[in-house]
Image (spheres, rainbow, N blue to C red):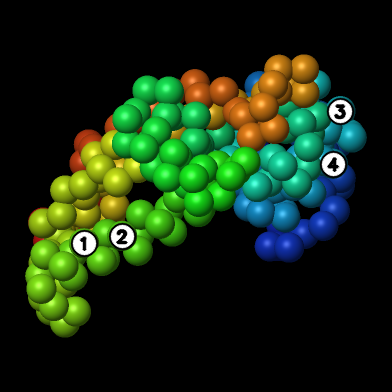
Amino acid sequence: METLADLRYPLGTSDYTSFFPRVQSLKPDILCMINFGRDLVNAAKQAYDFGITRQVKIVTPVLLISARMAAGPEPFEGVVGATSYYWKIEDSLASAKAFNDRYRKAHPGTVPTDYGALGYAGVRAVLTAARNAKSTDSDKVIPALEALKYDFYKGPQSYRKCDHQSVQSLILLQSKSAANVRDKNDVFDVIGIDNGSDKMLRSCQELGHRA
C-alpha cells in the first residue's frame, strides 16, 4: 500500500470540502477518514455531496451506529470500518444473543449500541473483579482484574497485565445501502470478526512495558 497524502485538520472541523479536490486529483483507491462522532458525520455527508463516495472506497477506523443513524444511509453506503460491538453478531455468538435479549426485555424495540455495550462490559468487569477480590480496595481489585477471563457479551476478553490493555475482538463492518436495510437497527453487514489475541497487539516490550 502506498500513502499518497496525509491531509490533516483540527478537531471539530465543520467544512471538509476544501480537501476533496486534492483527493480527486490524487485518484486514490482508498480514502481513510480518521474522524469521530459529529466530525465523521459531517465528513461523510460532504464526501457524498461532493461525489467522492462514487469515486473511491471510504474506510474509517471507527464506524459507529450512532454516526450512521445521524447521517442516514446514502452518505455511508459502502463505507467500511471497525467497531467494538454490533448487535447482529448475535447470529454467531451466544453471549451476544443473551446480552441483546436482556437489553430488548428492558428496552423494547431497541438494541444495544456499540458504546452502550462497551459501558456495560466495563462496569461489569470492575464489579466482577471487586466481587472476586471481596474488596473495593484498588490494590486488591487490580490483580483480580488482571486475572479476569470473561465473555459478557462478545466473546472472550481479558486484560493484558503489562499495560492493562483490553484484549478483545474487533468487528469489521460495511454500511448497507438504503435498499438493503430491512430493519431500522440493522444498518451494517458484518464482514469479519478478528478475535482478541495478544498477537494482534503491539508487544509489551515494543511499548516499553515489562511483561
Mark 2 crowdedness (10 Å alpha carbons): few <14, some 14-19, many ≥20: few
Residue 192 falls left or right of residue 164: right
Q: Earlier in the sequence, mark 3 or mark 1?
A: 3
Q: Residue 134: give x, y in percent of width and height.
A: 10, 73
Q: Residue 61: give x, y in percent of width and height.
A: 54, 41
> Which label belongs to residue 46?
4
**Mark 3 residue type:** Gly
Q: Between tags 2 and 3, which lies in front? A: 2
Spatial CA span between label 2 and label 3: 44 Å
| Residue at (42% x, 29% y) in the render | 90
Looking at the picture, does residue 90 appear above or below residue 135? above
Q: Between tags 4 and 2, which lies in front? A: 2
Q: On the image, which quarter does residue 170 sit in?
A: top left
Question: Label 2 near label 4: C-beta < 8 Å?
Answer: no
Q: Which residue is mark 1?
A: 128
Spatial CA span between label 4 and label 1: 44 Å
Spatial CA span between label 4 and label 2: 39 Å
Looking at the picture, does residue 113 appear above or below residue 170? below
Spatial CA span between label 2 and label 1: 6 Å
102 or 174: nearer the viewer: 102
Mark 3 crowdedness (10 Å alpha carbons): few <14, some 14-19, many ≥20: few
Q: Which residue is mark 2?
A: 124
Q: Between tags 3 and 1, which lies in front? A: 1
Q: Earlier in the sequence, mark 4 or mark 1?
A: 4
Q: Earlier in the sequence, mark 4 or mark 2?
A: 4
Question: Label 3 near label 4: C-beta < 8 Å?
Answer: no
Q: Which residue is mark 3?
A: 51
**Mark 4 residue type:** Gln
Looking at the picture, does residue 74 appear above or below residue 37? above
**Mark 1 residue type:** Thr
